[in-house]
Amino acid sequence: MASEVYSKAITKLYGETVSLTTTASHLLFRPDYQEVMLYCASQFRIGLAPRLAAVEYYSASGTSYTSYLTQAIDRDSATHVPLDAMATGDYLYLGFTEPVRGFHFTIDATNKNDNAATLDMEYMSAIAAGAATFTDVASDSDGTNVAGDTLKQSGLYAFTLPAVVQGIVTVLNSNEPLYWYRFCPSATLSATVDVTDITPACDTVNYGYMEAGVVHQFHLNTAKNGAFEFDHTGTGTLDVTWVRL
């Protein structure tokens, strides 16, 4: 039997599985792991998504900005981005290392939105002297919407890849030049809305092809990337082993 050989000593392994279908699956990198091994008995496809580098909630009533980056990407269901009673003047800003065509929201099964509302989704189309101009995205599709209630279930909010620009927005708490998106609701959301994870989507669905029955091992570029997208021509089970060095 062949043996797996690592270039560095490993300190921890973490395993999980992903059920693959013709609908894309979205998987955040597991924090503090540097490599990953992937195995599926049948051929699958994979895309690398940019890193979500900043999450800023703007409260119009308090005229304040609060960072929720850790809560958005820690893959811990006990923490969350609170969108409790989010009003029409409030915004959630999302900053990425590269442009994205959407993001997958993981919504708490109990603390979800039950009010009739849609999301007004925008991207940063221009920036000058730290002041940003935001423009509506096109052809958006809200996979979190149930019977007119946005953020009611986990799903992908997708749109046509926009001509988003990169920059540092002065009022936000990030000094990293990022590609910024933001949204506000069309009506006030329910009193308690918990978004446990926000997973960036790739800029394209032209994923790479991974051969069947082969262990694919990668070193992760966590400075640039933050998530995977997977799909399959039918169905399959993907074994994912995260490696900490």
Image (spheres, rainbow, N blue to C red):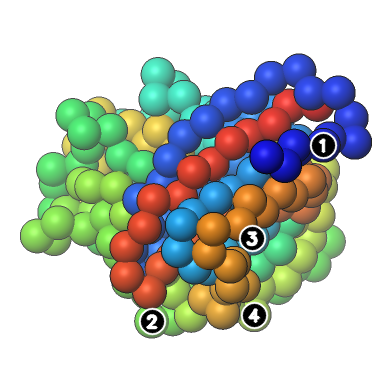
Marking on residue 186: none
What residue is shown with label 2? 139
What residue is shown with label 3? 48
The quadrant of the rendering that contains the C terminus is top right
The 10 Å Cα crowd at callout 1, few under 14, some 14 to 19, many 20 or more, is: few
Marking on residue 5: 1
Q: Are marks 2 and 4 in contact (CB under 8 Å)?
A: no
Amino acid, disc 3: Leu
Q: CA separation, marks 1 and 4? A: 43 Å
- Counting residues from the start of the chain, the first of labels 1 and 2 encountered is 1
Question: The residue tagged with tag 1: helix, strand or loop?
Answer: loop
* 183 and 78: which is toward the camera: 78
Amino acid, disc 4: Ala
Q: CA separation, marks 2 and 4? A: 14 Å
The 10 Å Cα crowd at callout 3, few under 14, some 14 to 19, many 20 or more, is: many
Amino acid, disc 2: Ser
- Counting residues from the start of the chain, the first of labels 3 and 4 encountered is 3
Residue at the far right: name it.
7
* 162 and 240: which is toward the camera: 240
Residue drawn at x 59%, y 73% as measured from the top left = 209
Q: Are marks 3 and 4 in contact (CB under 8 Å)?
A: no
- Counting residues from the start of the chain, the first of labels 1 and 4 encountered is 1
What residue is shown with label 4? 163
Amino acid, disc 1: Val
Question: The residue tagged with tag 2: helix, strand or loop?
Answer: loop
